[in-house]
Structures are given as structure tokens and as C-alpha cells.
Image (cartoon, helix red, strand yellow):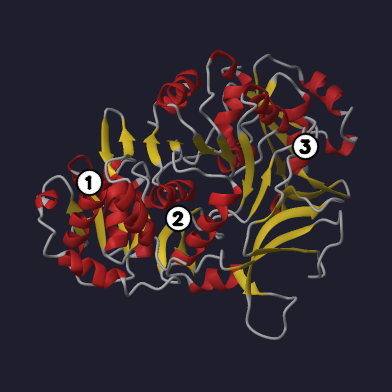
Amino acid sequence: MKINLLEYLDKNAVVNFPDKIAVIEGEKSIDFKNLCLQSKQLALHIIKQNDFTNQPIAVFLPKSIASVVANLAITYSSNIYMNLDIKYPEERLRNVINKIEPKIIITNSNLYNHLIKIIGEDLIIINIDTENIFNTNISDKEQLIYNRINKIIDTDPYCIINTSGSTGTPKGVALNHKSFIDFIEWSIPTLEISDNEIIGSLSPLYFDIYSFEICLLMAKASTIVIISEQLATFPAKLIEFLSIQKITFIFWVPTIMVNIANLDILSKFDLRDLKRILFAGEVFPTKHMNYWRKHIPEAKFINLYGPIEITLDCTYFIIEKEIPNETPIPIGFPCRNTDVLILNDDNKLATTNEKGELCIRGTSLALGYWNDPEKTANAFVQNPLNKHYPELIYKTGDVVFKNDIGEIVFVGRKDFQIKHLGYRIDLSEIEHVIVNCFEVIDNACVLYNFNKKEIHLFYEASTPMSTLDIRKELLKYLPKYMIPTQMQNFEELPRNPNGKIDRNLLNTLIKDGTNK
């Protein structure tokens, strides 16, 4: 069993596939031999700055070959990488830096002055373009790196991933080597990941999906093909890119996949090389998933579920049967070495078909929130079913139930549940009905105005619909008390940096009274 993630890279990819292309970025590429060399050269430069270990080092770079080198270098230096969004607003970036307190920030010449303007010169900043890093001869210094790596234990932190926080400053979730190793050892045989995967990498580098793609690069010598952010805004060009690059593996958030289905783009391209299609992060409407399955019938489709506080994902569902459009896709079954507890309001295990909060125990749990013991203590709590010894669980806030055949089905967020006209309503249920029962509605977001006691519907429709027509159609599927009071059509719903519908922004429209 591996103790640290670099054992995959050094004992497989570099030894067995030194000349294989590891990362492709536009017209540029790098093989495993040179990827490893450059990572070690940068690692030595990091060590030279300050001889610490198990400390956060921030990466302020665009998604690129350089960002992959930086992440691996930080791991080679026995430290913790934290990828930052280069488009962060200045105050948000400053807040993250102040919260996490990284020892070093790695950036390039294009971003150096911008970074200095925001955070000043108190921190060590490595500019990878100007410090002659990649001319270093490592032959007589490589043992220094391995002496440090050999001291890593599997519960040491591997990376920090920032997630939204209620105070406006993201929380830094610390994840360890062992949790990633667990997920890799489960996912490779279960998802039948081969030695020849070509990954169409669309997720931002501050996503956990991107960290998983780097793990596959190390463990299976997979090739990462970086998809430019600009390409993602043109669905037809994006799918053409997958075809040209002969992409075999994608792991995407469903939003872009919904847009591709709405535009019927898959019928125009040959994606016979695409064999594994993973999706996570939000609900994938069943009718859109069925469109993908129809056009790529030979591919394996896997629905994965897990909050960022769980390393990558904790449940999975391999879609091997027909699912009617009106039926939600199950989130399935626990991944290996992970236990899912569905707790009802009495903190007891829910029975079959009884809704409860999904809670997780096992090594997949994050170490906690970096520099925030109070939030950690509130989120990671003692297992109420275990009174015999300390055992933490993470309470996700997600409401699920286990159906008659043992599949876990996602219902919605606890905080998406409201009490309206005396009825308990889950707003996610209304969203599901709207998206799956209206051919012309592509995306929907349902929110609640607690002051006026009104349900608000925001939606994207390819053909305009009257409020009356929407209400009439919804009454076929929902009781009257669940029909939205206010409705507003958008040409395109606002999105946050993660590509998800920006519910916070839409909530401000409700509070400001600007929606119609």
C-alpha cells in the first residue's frame, strides 16, 4: 500500500512511461521524464527558500503545464499545495491568503505585479519565469528530496481546497494523502480506468476534480489535455476538441453537459474514443443524461457524489439501466472504505424510503478547515450512533433516502427545505420537475422569499412561455402550494466561478425586489 502519492509517479509513470506525454496545453506538451525533472527542480528551489515541511504553499497560476509542475513540486518538497483562482476579487484573495497563511506563493511574470499589489511583499513569492529554476542540476541533490519524502506519513496533508464560507471568506479544506490513495485504489478497478486514458480536463485547477486528474496522471500515467476556459464557452467547439484529441475520459460538472444536450451537439460529432464519463457537483437532470447515453452508448456513465469535506466523492452510481426522464439519477452506493449514515431528526438510522441527512464516516473525511478549529468542530462531530470511543462524522446537510433496492437517492439540501402554507417543501423537487417536464426550459433555480412567503422561479427557456402556461403545466405534477408565485426568464442564468448557478446573486434579486 502506498504511503504518499508520489510513490505512484516515481514507481510507475516515470519508470515505465518516461517518454509518454503527461500534459498537453494548446501547442505545448511535456513528457513524464521532464515533468518529473522540472517538478524536482522547483522543489529544490522551494526547499532553499525555507526548510519547512507540512506547510501550505499557494499556487497563483493559470491552469497549465506550469500549474501541474508547481503542484508536484510542492508535494516533492513535502508540503501542501493550495491552488488559487487567478480571477478572485482582490479582497477575496487577500482574505484567503490571510486565513491560510501560506509560506510561499508560486506565480509567473504575468501575474507577479498583480499579486504584489494585493498582498504586498511580506510573503516569499517565487516567480517561475525569472529565477533560473529549471536550469538546476539535480543529480547531486535528488537524495535531499527523497529524504524528505520518506518522512511523509499517509495522514499528512496533501492539499488545501477552498470552499465557500458564510462569512465571505472561503474555508480551506485540508485533505491528506491516505484519503486520495484510498479513492485511487477504489476508483481504478471499479471504474475500469486503463493505462491509456486521455483526460479532457475542463475543471478549474482549484477544484478537487483537477486534483483527482493529477492523481490519475501519477497512478496510471494518464495524459491530461487541458481544455482552455475560452473553449468551454463554445459547446460545439468543445465537443469537436474532444473528438480531435481522442479524449477517452471526462469528469465534469453537469452544467456544460446540459447545455450540450440542449443544443443537440453530440449528434454532429464522433466521440467513439470517449469511454468513461464521470459527473459530480450538482444534479444532472435525467433527460439530459439520457441524451448523452443515447449518443455515446458504449461509454460508461458514473454519477459521483461528495462534498469537498469528503476526499473527492463518497458514493457512486454506475448507470447500467434505463432511467425514465422523470426519475432522478441515484447517487448510488458508498465507495470502498467509506460508510454512509442516513440520520433522521432523532439522530437514528433512517429506515427504507425515510428521508434523512447524509452523514459520512471513514478515512475519506477531510482533516478539517485550515486555521479554523471552531468551524471544524461544528462540521465534524462525534458519531451519535457510537458512544464507545471518539469517532468523527461529517454532516453534509444533504437530504437523501435509501430506496427499496438499497440505492441512495438525493432529495436536496436541508437548507433548500422550507415550510410554506403549513407544508414542508423541498425546492429541489420543484426544480427537478420543471427541468424534466418542460422541453423548452433548459435550467431552473427555485428560491424562497421568507419575508413575503413566496416561491420564486428563475429559468432559462429557449422559447418564451407565459406565467399562466407554466403554472398550468406544473399543476399536472405538483400540488398547488408548490407552484412558484413569481417567475422570471433569463437568456442565461448567472453562474459562479465554479460554473454552477449563482444562487446567492439570484437571492439578492429577491431581496432587492428587482425580479418580476
Q: Secondary structure at mark 1?
A: helix
Work out which residue is located at the far bottom of the displayed protein and give it. 388
At 76% from the left edge and 36% from the top edge, which residue is drawn? 321
Q: How many marks?
A: 3
At 49% from the left edge and 73% from the top edge, which residue is drawn? 373
User: Residue beneath label 2, please?
Assistant: 162
At 75% from the left edge and 42% from the top edge, which residue is drawn? 427
Which image quadrant is residue 398 in? Answer: bottom right
Q: Secondary structure at mark 3?
A: helix
Q: CA distance from mark 3 to mark 1?
A: 52 Å
Q: Position of residue 388 (x, y in %)?
A: 70, 86
- Nearer to us in this view, 350 or 102: 350
Q: Position of residue 109 (x, y in %)?
A: 17, 42
User: Residue beneath label 1, please?
Assistant: 34
At 66% from the left edge and 85% from the top edge, which residue is drawn? 389
Q: Amino acid at mark 3?
A: Ile
Q: Is residue 303 left or right of residue 402?
A: left
